[in-house]
Image (tube, rainbow, N blue to C red):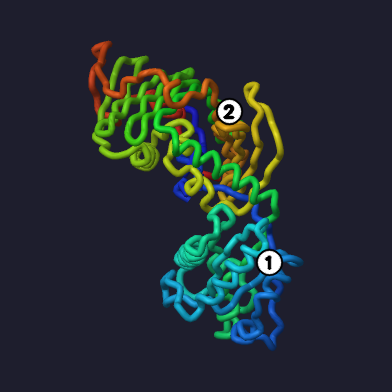
Amino acid sequence: MQSISHSMCFASIKRLVGSGVWAVCGALALALVFIAPRPALAETAEDLAAQYGREAMEQALQTKQRYDLYGIHFDVDKATIQPDTLSLLDDIETTLNQFPDWSLRIVGHTDATGDAVYNETLSLERANAIKAALVGRGIDATRLDTAGAGESQPVASNDTAEGQALNRRVELVRLGADAANAKRLVKAMSDYLAAQQAISFDYDAILEVITKEDQKLALASSGTIALNRPDKVHARRAGGFADVEMLFDGETLTVLGKNKNLYAQVAVPGTVDHLIDELRVKYDRPLPGADILLSNVYDEVMENVVDAKDLGSGVVGGVECDSLAFRSNEVDWQIWIAQGDHPYPCRYIITTKGMTGQPQYSIQIRNWKTGAEVAPTDFVFTNPTNAAKVDLTNLQDSADLPTNFMTGGAQ
């Protein structure tokens, strides 16, 4: 049996992303990497908070593109913003209204007391709380990124109470127009997809795997997907080792292995979004291009993104597209979005950064249809071939890898 370590991503960029952009990989981004200068020894967090002024913040963002903001207070071990610091949020709102071409990344930082993983989670929750407050003040969400650095980027020693206070801060990073435009284009695609009740398309996919001898192999498949929101999916996928059909009617998922004429059924009542999560997390059988089937693509794929680039135009399958690239700590991803009034995804590539060889998962879409263009589709399994019913765990050769491949951990 051939041993293969593989990782792919079509995550929920949070799932593209941690649990994995995308079911197979998990997250996304290149951040503008800024090394914060250590404050002068005479300065304390209280000194810096007292020296704060909106004009000084704006000047720092204009020149250095970053600003460490002290004075935003939260409840202990919570992401609840205390009322005495709301005036600072008012200043950020005023600045963003004054500079409408600016976009900001809000980065939460903590000291090194407590658990590192917990600190990272808490810092992200606090950054998200600030974003939510600004959105509530009327700032467009696409102009705001968030990240949680936890204790990983100290500006002072954590050995003293003063140093710990300096490390507890909110960092504002101004993103260039290039990054803002890339995010805007993804948001436009997300809004367009969410507005379509019926969608169908054909696709070609490549899943790369890495052998224990560090050889990169590419496994190719093609298929079709038909979706009817909120709770209907019909997917077909054929590769060199499997011919699989999936039907979901809002209550029951049916997986039919056509090559062996076997089928399995499991109850998964709920929406398409819920089905995508269950297939990825519980059954390890992610739908191809799962991210672009979600009802809110933007929030899923953009979580944890730390860098965005607008690469200009590209052509995919004869369709002129906007070419965009994003990075996170775990994965890089690129997407090509059709230009014009129907901004649908034409190609999507996720690159795993955490293992040797950086394998990719890619999907190229063709024959995109929406609304009345979508042919009538059956979402209820009728078993026309008298297939035998088996347990899903016994339905071989229906997942992304053939059974003679054994998966391993990331390297």
For discs 2 and 1, the disc positioned in front in the rendered view: 1
Vertical position of residue 307 compared to residue 262: above or below: below
- CB under 8 Å between discs 2 and 1: no
User: Quick one: 26 or 248, which is closer to the camera?
Assistant: 248
Viewer-proximal residue, 312 or 223? 312
Residue at image x 46%, y 66%? 122
- Which residue lies under the disc numbered 1? 66
- At mark 1, the secondary structure is strand
Which residue is the extreme one toward the top?
Answer: 385
| Placement of 182 over or under 152, stated as above or below | above
Q: Which residue ends up furthest to the bottom in the rendered image? A: 42
Residue 119 appearing in the image: yes
Q: Using the numbered discs, state the Cα–Cα distance from disc 2 to disc 1 in whole angstroms.
A: 42 Å
Residue density around tag 1, few if under 14, some if 14–19, many if 20 or more, within 10 Å? many
Local secondary structure at mark 2: strand
From where the camera sits, is residue 117 visible? no
Q: Quadrant of the C terminus?
A: top right
Residue at 37%, 30% in the rendered image: 228
Q: Earlier in the sequence, mark 2 or mark 1?
A: 1
Q: Position of residue 185 (x, y in %)?
A: 60, 42
Question: Is residue 78 shown left or right of residue 151?
Answer: left
Most distant residue in the right direction? 63
Q: Position of residue 348 (x, y in %)?
A: 57, 34
Q: Which residue is mark 2?
A: 217
Q: Quadrant of residue 63?
A: bottom right
Residue 233: assigned label: none
Residue 204, percent from left and from top: 53, 23
Amino acid under label 2?
Leu
Amino acid type, callout 1:
Arg
